[in-house]
Amino acid sequence: MSARLNWYKLSPDAYKAMLGLEQALEQSGLELSLLELVRLRASQLNGCAYCVNMHANDARQAGETEQRLQCLSLWRETTFFTPRERAALAWVESLTLLPQAGAPQARFESLREQFSDKEMVDLTLAISTINAWNRFGVGFALQPE
C-alpha cells in the first residue's frame, strides 16, 4: 500500500501545531523511555505501522531493551515493567480505547499512586498526541521508511 497523501506538506500549519505538542512534551519532565513506551503501545493499539516502527526505533535509542519491546503488547503478563510504567500503560489503553474501556476510576487511582497531578496531565497529553499522530498515519496510510 502506498501513502494516500502527504498531509504535512498539504497543511504545514497542522503539522506545526502537532510539533508544538511534541515540544511541550519534551519540556514536561516525563522520562523519555516512558514517553516512548506510551507512544509505541498506543500505536500498536491503533495499528499505525509507521508510528510503531518509528517509536520502537526511538525506544531502542533511548535505551529500551529488546525483551521489553517484544513483550510490550503483553505487558500485563510479564514482570518487565515497573509499577509506574504499568500504571501509564493501563492509562494508555483506557484513553486509546476510550469508547470500549472508558477511563475507570480504579485505573485513575493507580495512576495517581505513581504520578503527580502535573505528570498525569502531561501523560494524558502524550497519549492524546500520539493518538492524533496515529490518526494521520493510519488515515493517510503512511508507511515505515
Image (cartoon, grey):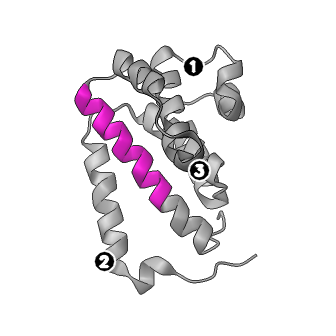
Task: Report the residue marked by disc 3.
Answer: 43
For label 2, the residue is 13
Marks 2 and 1 in Cβ contact (< 8 Å): no
Residue 75 forms part of the magenta stretch? no
Give me the disc on residue 119.
none
Q: Is residue 10 above or below residue 141?
A: below
**What is the quadrant of the C terminus in the image?**
bottom right
The picture places residue 59, in percent across and down from the top left corner, at 54, 39
Query: Mark 1 falls on what kind of element?
Result: loop
> Which of these two is toward me, 96 or 103?
103
Chain part drawn in magenta: 117-132
Q: Quadrant of the N terminus?
A: bottom right
The Cα atoms of the two marked residues, 1 and 3, are separated by 18 Å
> Along the polypeptide, which appears first: circle 1 or circle 3?
3
The local secondary structure at tag 3 comes to helix
Secondary structure of the residue carrying tag 2 is: helix
Q: In this figure, which residue is indicated by the disc labeled 1?
A: 81
Q: Are marks 1 and 3 in contact (CB under 8 Å)?
A: no
Amino acid at pointer 3:
Ser
Ranked by sequence position, the earlier of labels 2 and 3 is: 2
